[in-house]
Image: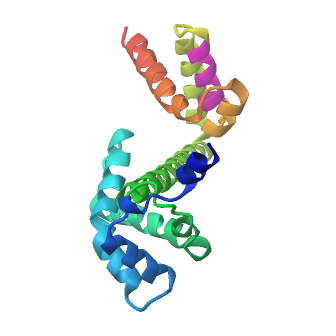
Amino acid sequence: MATVASQQSEPRHDLLTAQDRDLLRLCLAGAPGAWEAFLERFSGLLAFVAERSAAQRGISLPAADRDDLVADVMVEILRNNAAVLRGFTGRASLPTFLTVVARRACVRSLLRARRSRTASADRAVQDDERKNPAAVVANHDEIEALMQRLDPQAARLVRLHHLEGRSYGEISQITGLPLGSIGPALSQARQQMRGTSAN
């Protein structure tokens, strides 16, 4: 049994091609041109993972943004003296391993970008309110009237965001709702309110 267990813990070098093994060795040794060769070999794969990660979250990814995500992946790979690659055991092919690493890095970057956009939108609304306080009072009264047609949870979200000026992060902490669900819920509530205001 001990022999079987020790065999299972050893890396499976048969999954690593000679080309990838040599490239990995040269990169980790800091050989001149090694990282350029690495990027030339795997940039297409990393770009595909970036596009796929964005598409799975309903995000349209321009070429410049895709390249930024690929750069984020490379930063993750190179961080701490390429610790990610130094931890590669060979239990999967190198392209498969890099796909997993790239997907995680892309998802983190996409989530950071979404939080940044939400914060910017919140600041823009607050700036508008400071410039036109009379409109805020009118909007406040109109929103209060329309909220009576919403279900209690939707009305609470509208009150927190539009009347109290809470950010999505604050609303998530107050209500316990996932951060990513607040925007769509508010959008649906606004649609319902527009529908009732047309009547």
Q: Is residue 3 above or below residue 72?
A: above
Q: Is residue 9 magenta?
A: no
Residue visible at 57% across and 71% down? 79
Residue 155 lies, in percent from the top left, at 59, 16
Q: Is residue 185 above or below residue 127?
A: above
**Residue 61 in sight from this viewpoint:** no
In the rendered image, which quarter contains the N terminus? Answer: top right
What segment carries the magenta color?
Answer: 153-163
In the rendered image, which quarter contains the C terminus? Answer: top left
Q: Is residue 157 magenta?
A: yes
The extreme right residue here reads 174
Q: Is residue 146 above or below residue 59?
A: above
Residue visible at 51% across and 63% down? 88
Residue 66 lies, in percent from the top left, at 34, 60
Residue 43 lies, in percent from the top left, at 31, 68
Residue 174 lies, in percent from the top left, at 72, 28
Q: Nearer the viewer, residue 185 or 50?
A: 50
